[in-house]
Image (tube, rainbow, N blue to C red):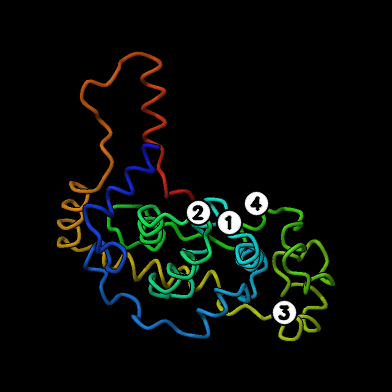
Amino acid sequence: MHWHCHFIQKLEDEPRIEFENLHRLYDGLRPTAPDAELLAAWSNGETGYPFFDACMRSLQATGWLNFRMRGMVMATASYHLWLDWWAPGEHLARMFTDYEPGIHWNQVQMQSGTTGINTVRIYNPVKQGHDQDPKGLFIRTWVPELRQIADQHIHEPWKAQNAKQILGKLYPEPVFDHLTAAKAARERVWGVRRSAEFRTNARAIATKHASRKTRPNARRGPRASQGQKQLDLPFGEQS
């Protein structure tokens, strides 16, 4: 409830978060108009990355993803596909059955690296697949086009011996190289973050919007300490 109210209050204090970069030095970093083909591939779960695509297809069918997967799909749009966060954020807002504007738009910007005060998190869609769906059961549920791909290659079907019979025919080839795209995105984002002006503006943002770790009249003792740990969880910064 603490984090729920914290993020709703941020949008209440600064409604422009829904439409503008929280840190304005990120303005113009990504093209304002999204690449229509890349946005469609991302939205429909047709990027050629099985675990990512399974997440997007599952979202379309159920209206829900867990927190980590929400972070991954948004970060993939912003970093790997280099799409401005608003169009993907709007798509997710339409999809989530638990859509709450304050939480949603703050998280969209956090996962896109435009707040200026949160750690840049670039999720590796292949690694996330191995970590979260090691046997590929989730992938096989939502990406049946890969039924002829052996288990050992389900996360990277382009490595399978029969890849040429599947990719580009039954299932799309990857629309981006996840390692190359992540490297380029990281360099661009950190290119902005290195300036003195960026740090000055980031401090002002943190003063207004960052969570308060020290609360007046807080209880002391073991139970209070445990409670504070709950409040200090790095919400939105999981990798």
Mark 1, residue position: 64
130, above or below 163, in the image: above
SS for callout 4: helix
Kindly indicate whether the residue at mark 3 contacts the one at mark 4 (C-beta within 8 angstroms).
Answer: no
Classify 92 as above or below 132: below
Mark 3 against mark 2, which lies toward the viewer?
A: 2
| Residue pictured at 55% horizontal, 74% vertical | 42
Q: Quadrant of the N terminus?
A: top left
Is tag 1's residue or tag 4's residue first in the polypeptide sequence?
Answer: 1
> Which tag, 4 or 2, sits closer to the chain's start?
2
Residue 101 numbered mark, or none:
none
Pointer 4 or 3: first along the chain: 4
Q: Is residue 164 left or right of residue 79?
A: right
Q: Position of residue 63 (x, y in %)?
A: 58, 60
Percent coordinates x, y for residue 216 in the rendering: 20, 25
Callout 3 amino acid: Tyr
What's the CA distance linking mark 1 and mark 4?
A: 16 Å
- Mark 2, residue position: 98
**Residue 74, position as x, y percentages in the image:** 47, 64
Count neighbours of disc 2 (C-alpha within 10 A) and say few if under 14, some if 14 to 19, many if 20 or more: few
Distance, label 1 to label 3, CA atoms, is 24 Å
Earlier-in-chain disc, 1 versus 3: 1
The front one of 98 and 109 is: 98
Estimate the spatial distance between the alpha carbons at disc 4 and disc 3, rounded to whole Å.
22 Å
Check contact, mark 1 vs mark 3: CB within 8 A.
Answer: no
- Label 1 or label 4, whichever lies nearer to me, is 1
Q: Quadrant of residue 17?
A: bottom left
Pointer 4 residue: 132
User: Can you name the residue that lies furthest to the top here?
Assistant: 221
